[in-house]
Image (tube, rainbow, N blue to C red):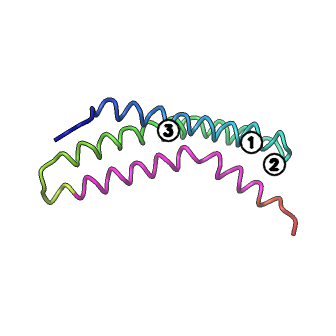
Amino acid sequence: MNHFSFDELQRKDLFIALGLWVTVELVSFVFFPAVALINPGDRLKTWFLISLPLGLGGALLISASSRFLAMSHDRAAGTNKMLFIILGQFGGWIGLVGILFPFFMVCSEFFSNIKL
């Protein structure tokens, strides 16, 4: 029995993922350079350009995989159900990596410039 709409679930997850991505972009490319935690240079512009398709694609992948998982749970028990659930979870994690790519790059820049 289904108490929610798959379309509403997908739309909600898309907006949450896009909000997370925009927040990560602002922190990574506006806040960190503004407080001089990282040096804004040519690499920062390249990372920003790479993060655009990765972030948007990651948000789409998260919303699609949440719908895929919800539809997989409605299937009758069978041998393929667990495979579909694992595939949906894997897609969600890959989408999350795409969204968090700018944060990973900025953190690597920050920790590589620390002088101990």
Quarter in which the N terminus is drawn:
top left
Quick one: 39 or 20, which is closer to the camera?
A: 20
Label placed on residue 17: 3
**Other-residue count near label 1 (Cα within 10 Å), few / some / many at <14 / 14–19 / ≥20:** some
Q: Residue at x 83, y 62 (%)?
A: 114
Label placed on residue 38: 2
Quick one: 50 or 62, which is closer to the camera?
A: 62
Label placed on residue 113: none
The secondary structure type at the circle numbered 3 is helix
Disc 1 or 2, which lies upstream in sequence? 2
Q: Circle 1 is placed at which residue position? A: 44
Marks 1,2: beta carbons within 8 A: yes
Q: Residue furthest front?
A: 3
Task: Report the amino acid beneath label 1.
Answer: Leu
Query: For residue 88: magenta?
Result: yes
CA gap between label 2 and label 3 equals 25 Å
Task: Report the amino acid beneath label 2.
Answer: Ile
Which secondary structure dominates the residues rendered in magenta? helix
Part of the protein shown in magenta: 82-110
Residue 4 appears left or right of 51: left
Q: Residue at x 47, y 38 (%)?
A: 59
